[in-house]
Image: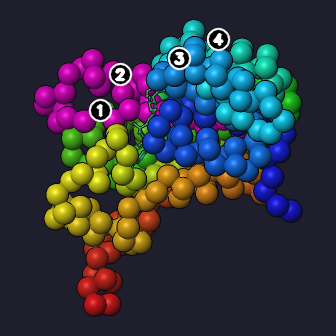
Amino acid sequence: MLIDYTGRVVVVTGAARGIGRVIAERFRAEGADVVALDLAFDEADESAAGTVAAGSGPGITMIPCDVSDPASVASAVARIDERFGRIDVLVNNAGINVDGLVADLDPARFARALEVNVGGVFAVSQAVAPVMKRAGTGRIINAASFAAIVPSIGSAAYAASKAAVVQFTRVLAGELGPWGITVNAYAPGMIPTAMNGFAELPEDAQSRLLDTLTIRRWGSPDDIADLLCFLASDFAGYITGTLVDVSGGKLATQIPSRAYESER
Ligand code: NAI
């Protein structure tokens, strides 16, 4: 059996740029009809993409949506249901980074991290679940973070929100099991994007971060897309309620760089 997404509808949130964009493009390349949601899109994007998607091949339909606003989510999901009549896969990728020491952190920024990162996963999953239940099948895949496993100093808001995504994932997996819907989370390690600016750090700072990795290179959005194509496929029907670490073995051992030193 080959992984084939022909005829499947895949919804990716936060797909205007970064990892989400690559995930959307990958599912499209694998044959799916993809719906990309992002607050960075506007109505013009949706009608332009609608024209592209009207051809015979699969397309990417861009719909403006703020995942932290339940009304915006409800409207986007209703439009998807009306246009396609099904949602096979939901990738809850949208997220924001909020950093700052607890001592200095503005409570409104702390709340916003929770509102977008876990509130968004909740709102979109809640809106999409009835469409999947109707079909008796589905895959929901949520972006957590390595910060949910080992957090960094200054990441209290972000790490707490991502740890919440992991527990939310387990509970939802339990609640949707009877409908044959699987729910999983993934924990990317360090993937240079506009969100974190890793690629712009001074060379010695980059080197220190890379020293925490077992596979000593930055992650790429394709590393995530590879995992998601598997988790969303028929091959992964017995995997649910898990957190998959895609971090190049970050801190798998205490000082992974030792192996590279002895190799040299
Ligand atoms: P990014 O900042 O490059 O892209 C995030 C996208 O989400 C943007 O297009 C943005 O417009 C959209 N977005 C933000 N708030 C939204 C909202 N309320 N409603 C709809 N869309 C919204 O981020 P990146 O690096 O691509 O990260 C994607 C996901 O992966 C995030 O959930 C992030 O926490 C997670 N992640 C990323 C890591 C990395 O190293 N880049 C590491 C661990 C997790």
Is the distance from the Cβ of mark 4 to the nearest ligand 1 atom less than 8 Å?
no
| Image quadrant assignment for residue 7 | top right
Disc 4 from disc 2: Cα separation: 22 Å
Instruction: Measuring from the top left, give residue 147's x and y in whole percent.
Output: 37, 47
Residue 205 image point, x, y percent: 18, 60
* Element under disc 1: loop
Q: Toward the viewer: 69 or 28?
A: 28
Identify which amino acid the numbered label 1 is placed on.
Val
Q: Which tag is nearer the camera, tag 4 or tag 2? A: 4
Please state which amino acid type lies under the numbered disc 3.
Asp
Q: Is residue 205 above or below residue 176?
A: below
- Residue 106 inside the magenta-drawn segment: yes
In this rendering, which labeled residue sits more in front, label 3 or label 2? 3
Residue identified by numbered label 3: 42
Which residue sits at x=41%, y=72%? 215
Q: Which mark is residue 208?
A: none
Discs 4, 2 touching: Cβ within 8 Å: no
Q: Which residue is mark 4?
A: 75
Vertical comparison of 242 with 171: above or below? below
The span shown in magenta is 89-117
Image quarter where ligand 1 lies: top left
Name the one closer to the observer, 63 or 86: 63
Which residue is the site of mark 2? 112
Give the CA separation, mark 3 to mark 2. 22 Å
Residue drawn at (36%, 51%), measured in percent from left and top?
Answer: 192
The figure's colour scheme reads rainbow
Q: Nearer the viewer, residue 151 or 224?
A: 224
Which residue is identified by label 1? 98
| Callout 2 touching callout 1 (CB < 8 Å) | yes
Whether residue 199 sits left or right of residue 178 in the image: it is left
Q: Is disc 3 surrounded by few (<14), some (14 to 19) or many (20+) residues within 10 Å?
A: few
